[in-house]
Image: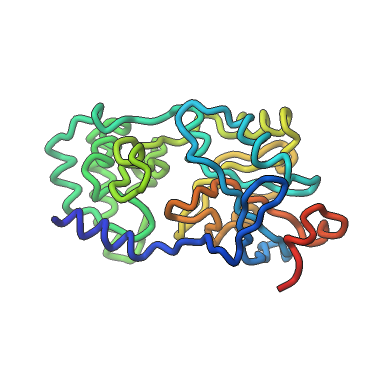
Amino acid sequence: MKNAKKEDTREKSYQYRNSDSSRLEVGGVTCFRRKDMVSSSGGTYRRLAIQTHFIDRGESYIRLMQQYVVPLYQEGDILSISEKTITMCQNHVTEKKDVKLGFWAKFLSRFASSNSHGVGMDEPYKLQLAINLCGLPRILLAVACSAVTKLFGVHGVFYRVAGHGIDGIDGFYANSKFALYHDIALLNPVEPGRVCDEIWQECGVACMIVDANDLNVKILGKSSPLASVSDSVLSSLIRDNPAGQQDELTPFILIRPLKNKAGSSLADCYSEE
């Protein structure tokens, strides 16, 4: 009952970012216009959230680029890719049936804090997976450090101490409309920088792979043309999490500087309100 109430709270707090008024059809691709964003460098950018089919395990991310992104992409654009997409393509997941729930995961999950931005360590199976990846001693240390630092208003220590990429674990979403997400956890993508460079070489798309939610943004990898752009600037372009936190199916965010608007095949999409 306790977990059901937490899931209820999360579901109600999500804001669905796709609306009919912002929907566009461009080159046979469905996308949704997001609010303009001013980056930390002072530039202004327009963003399109590109809608895809439900991306299943083992799909080709190069083929996805060719199908959904290449028809819209122009020189100077930046593509933000949800890390879940690459993880699914790499099939870097763990199934719930392979996670044997133990005493410590059941016990510690009762004291873990929950939030409205995803499934946290209050989900016993997710905590058990963290124990499997990090080892019980490190998780106990992370729990102890987190308990102490929270008294002083410091948050996020658990994930920093635990390490091993567990802050990037997604999944076991009981309320997702996609049944597959109920029973799998997605780990961090493998070699995200290499993936970005492969996309650049094969498709000519400058991109970054991000772990983003309504709380924060982490840049996991970026292609060579973006090497000189700081992570803080790139993060500022999607700080409002334009991909969405629910089931929008918009894992690709096309980011375009306004100075590139003239002559663009997407000029009509970017017309002023």
Place of residue 73 in the rendered image (x, y in percent of width and height, measured from the top left)? 74, 45
216 and 269: which is toward the camera: 269
Residue appearing at x 24%, y 37% in the figure:
128
116 and 148: which is toward the camera: 116
Q: Residue furthest right?
A: 263
In this rendering, the answer to whether 161 lies above or below 190 is below
- Looking at the image, residue 153 sits to the left or right of residue 92; the answer is left
73 and 222: which is toward the camera: 73
- Looking at the image, residue 58 sits to the left or right of residue 12; the answer is right
Label count reads: 0
Residue appearing at x 57%, y 42% in the figure:
209
How has the structure been colored for display? rainbow
Place of residue 158 in the rendered image (x, y in percent of width and height, measured from the top left)? 32, 49
Residue appearing at x 29%, y 36% in the figure:
183
Place of residue 249 in the rendered image (x, y in percent of width and height, measured from the top left)? 50, 48
- Looking at the image, residue 107 sits to the left or right of residue 56; the answer is left
| Image quadrant where residue 169 sits | top left
In this rendering, the answer to whether 129 lies above or below 153 is above
Quarter placement of the C terminus: bottom right
Quarter placement of the N terminus: bottom left
Residue appearing at x 72%, y 39% in the figure:
70
In this rendering, the answer to whether 194 lies above or below 145 is above
Place of residue 177 in the rendered image (x, y in percent of width and height, measured from the top left)? 36, 48
